[in-house]
Image (cartoon, rainbow, N blue to C red):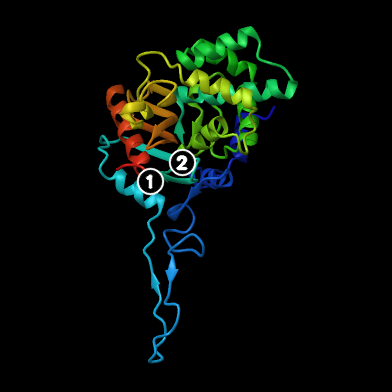
Amino acid sequence: MASSRARRARRHPSRIRPALLAFAVLGATVTGAAYGQGHARPGAGGAVSSSASAPSGGEAAVETVEPVVDGDARLAAAMASVPVPDGAEVSVAVLDPDSGAGAAYGTGAFETASIVKVDILAALLLRAQDAGRSLTAAEKSYAAAMIEKSDNDSASALWRAIGTADGLDAANERLGLTGTEGGDGPLWGLTRTTAADQVALLRQVFVADGSALSGASRAYVRGLMERIAEGQRWGVSAAADAAGGTAGSGWALKNGWLRRSTTGLWIVNSIGRVARGGHGCLVAVVSRGSGTQAAGISLTEAAARAAVSAVPGDPP
C-alpha cells in the first residue's frame, strides 16, 4: 500500500480544474471560465449569423454575433446574492444530465465530513462487483445505517472494508474523481474533495451512461439516499420543486457536518439529486468556516438554490 504522503505526492496540485475536466469527460457541459475564460469558441460560443445574400447595391453582408451567456457566469451572478458569513467559504457545482448543461463556482478542496459516505459505499460496491458477489447482510446493515442515519461507526467499519484511503483513492480513479484524496488513517471525515468531483460521483450514481457502477448498484445507492432520516433532510433538497419536495420523488441526498475542534467552526456540505422544472439536477455544495451549524445549513441551501437557478430552462 502506498503511504499517505506518497499518495499526496501523486496528486495534481490544482484541485478544481482537473475535477472539472473529468466532469466534462463524463458528459457535462461546463462552459466559460472552466475552459475558455468566457471567450466564444467555435461550436460552443456565440452564434454567428449573416444575411443570405448581399443587398442589390453590392454592399457586403453584415455579420452579427449573439452574446454568450455561459453556465459559470450565470452561477456566479446567482451566487452574488447568497449571503456568505464572514470568514466562511463555499463552492458549488451543478449538472443537468439530460441537457449536459452544468456550472461550477468556487475553487479549492474541502473536507468532506459525512458526504464521503456515498463515496465509501460506491467503493464497496465496486469491490463487490469485481468479486461477482452481492453485499453481505452485515455490509447492507452498515450501508443503510451509514447513509440513512449517517452512523459513524458503520462508516468506520466500511472504511476498513474498502482498504481505508488507499481503497477509496483506487475506486475514485475508476469513478473519475480527480480532486479527491482519502483522509489519513481512520479519519474518513477529513477526506478532501471538490464540488465538481462530488457531481462527478453523483453522475456515477444517477446516470447509467459511462458509470462504473452496475444498474443494481446505482439503484441501491439511490434508494438509501431517498430514505434519509428525519432531521437530516436539509441541504440541496431546498432546491427541489415545492410540489416534488418529498423523499423519493423530489430529492435524494447525503449531508455532512463537522465542527472542527481546532477552530470551533463548522464544515457543512450537501450533495444529491433534486427535481426541478420537470427534470433532475445533480448538485453539490461544500462549505467551511460557518460559526454555527445552522448558519452552514442556510449557506448550503442558498447555494443549492442558486446553482439550480443557473441551469438553462430552470425557473429563476
Residue 174 picture location, percent across and down: 65, 35
Residues at badges 2 and 1 in contact (C-beta under 8 Å)?
yes
Q: How many residues crowd around disc 1 within 10 Å: few (fewer than 14), some, or many (20 or more)?
A: few
Q: Residue at x 63, y 7 (%)?
A: 137
Q: Mark 2 points at which residue?
A: 96
In terms of depth relative to the viewer, which is nearer, 215 or 135?
A: 215
Q: Is residue 124 left or right of residue 43?
A: right
| Distance between the alpha carbons at the discs numbered 2 and 1 | 10 Å
Q: Where is residue 272 in the image (x, y as percent from the top left)?
A: 45, 29
Q: What residue type is labelled 2?
A: Asp
Looking at the image, residue 302 sits to the left or right of residue 61; the answer is: left
**Which quadrant holds residue 251?**
top left
| 213 lies above or below 23 | above
For marks 2 and 1, the one nearer the N-term is 2
Q: Is mark 2 on a helix, strand or loop?
A: loop
For the residue pair 215 and 163, the one nearer the viewer reads as 215
Where's residue 32, x and y in %?
43, 55
Give above or below for 173 relative to 47.
Answer: above
Q: What element carries label 1?
A: loop
> Which quadrant would residue 213 be assigned to in this image?
top right
Identify the residue position indicated by label 1 in the image.
313
Q: Is residue 271 visible?
A: yes
Q: Tell me what residue is drawn at x 42 percent, y 23 percent.
A: 256
* Residue 123 appears in the figure: no
Q: Residue type at mark 1? A: Gly
